[in-house]
Image (cartoon, rainbow, N blue to C red):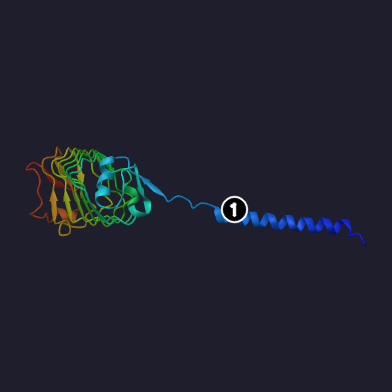
């Protein structure tokens, strides 16, 4: 009987081992668990409970599926005892937001660039960030404690209701004209000067409301 050369035997063994390893690797790929779905942290239980009531979330556990948050175009969550909207930035398709009659003290909406309507009246707002909201049409923050408000990026505004705050100044010069901004209410603020552009100054809309001592000017000190 002829002897099989040693190197041929080793080649055969190596081939078998290689096939076995490939099989193991393939099995491993098949059995890899799916990556968990991304979730958005919702710090305020009252906010999340409101999402549950709207069938956006299913249980109050501190987070919501990011994919579900990204599908929401309108949120009406008035009078829900909400103190924080942390997590709202992931609601990237949001166009309308109503959160009146809550206890929200601060909110950053600068990532929600599709917003057209924002109503945060009767809260405890000390700050609101509406930068980069280029298509925002209505902003209502009446009856809060805002000391400043930057609307320089909100040139599409048609309604601006900021009465009953603690604003020391407001600059409307980014608004093209008074015809577009058909509603403006600023009474009961400690400011005395409202900055506008020349086109607005020459034709102040009669329906705008302010305190009697407030004046419109191209420059406010």
Quadrant hosting residue 178: bottom left
Question: Which residue lies most toward the front here?
Answer: 1
Q: Residues within 10 Å of mark 1 (few under 14, many from 20)?
A: few
Identify which residue, 173 or 47, lies in the foreground. Answer: 47
Q: Is residue 219 visible?
A: no
Q: Secondary structure at mark 1?
A: helix
Q: Position of residue 148 (x, y in %)?
A: 23, 40
In the image, is 45 to the left or to the right of 101? right
Give percent across and percent down for residue 143.
Answer: 15, 41
Identify the residue at horizontal 63%, vertical 54% (top origin): 25
Give the answer, above or below, for where 98 lies relative to 191: below
Residue 23: image quadrant is bottom right
Q: Is residue 133 left or right of residue 183?
A: right
Q: Tell me where residue 42 appears, x and y as whole percent.
A: 33, 43
Q: Measuring from the top left, give residue 24's x and y in whole percent.
A: 64, 54
Q: Residue furthest bottom?
A: 1
16 is higher (above) or lower (below) than 46: below
The residue under label 1 is 28
- Indicate left or right for 94 with 199 as reference: right
> Residue 22, can we see it?
yes
Give the position of the N terminus as an image quadrant: bottom right
Viewer-closest of 54 and 100: 54
Q: Which of the two residues, 1 or 63, is positioned nearer the viewer here?
A: 1
Q: Residue at x 31, y 43 (%)?
A: 60
Judged left or right of residue 169, residue 66 is right
Residue at (32% x, 57% y) in the render: 71
What residue is drawn where x is 20% and y is 46%? 120
Count of picture labels? 1
Most foreground residue, 138 or 202:
138
Quarter the C terminus occupies: top left
């Amino acid at each position: 009987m002829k002897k099989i050369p040693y190197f041929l035997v080793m080649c055969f063994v190596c081939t078998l081992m290689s096939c076995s390893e490939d099989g193991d690797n393939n099995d491993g790929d098949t059995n890899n668990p799916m990556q968990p779905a991304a979730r958005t942290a919702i710090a305020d239980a009252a906010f999340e409970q409101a999402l549950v009531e709207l069938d956006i979330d299913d249980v109050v556990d501190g987070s919501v599926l990011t994919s579900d948050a990204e599908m929401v175009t309108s949120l009406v969550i008035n009078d829900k005892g909400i103190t924080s909207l942390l997590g709202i930035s992931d609601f990237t398709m949001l166009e309308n937001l109503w959160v009146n009659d809550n206890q929200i003290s601060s909110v950053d909406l600068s990532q929600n660039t599709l917003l057209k309507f924002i109503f945060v009246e009767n809260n405890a707002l000390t700050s609101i960030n509406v930068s980069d909201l280029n298509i925002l049409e209505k902003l209502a923050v009446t009856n809060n404690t805002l000391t400043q408000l930057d609307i320089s990026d909100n040139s599409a505004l048609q309604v601006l209701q900021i009465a009953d705050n603690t604003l020391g100044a407001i600059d409307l010069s980014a608004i093209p004209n008074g015809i577009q901004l058909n509603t403006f209410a600023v009474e009961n603020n400690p400011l005395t000067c409202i900055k506008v552009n020349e086109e607005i100054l020459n034709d102040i809309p009669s329906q705008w409301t302010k305190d009697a001592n407030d004046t419109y000017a191209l420059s406010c000190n």
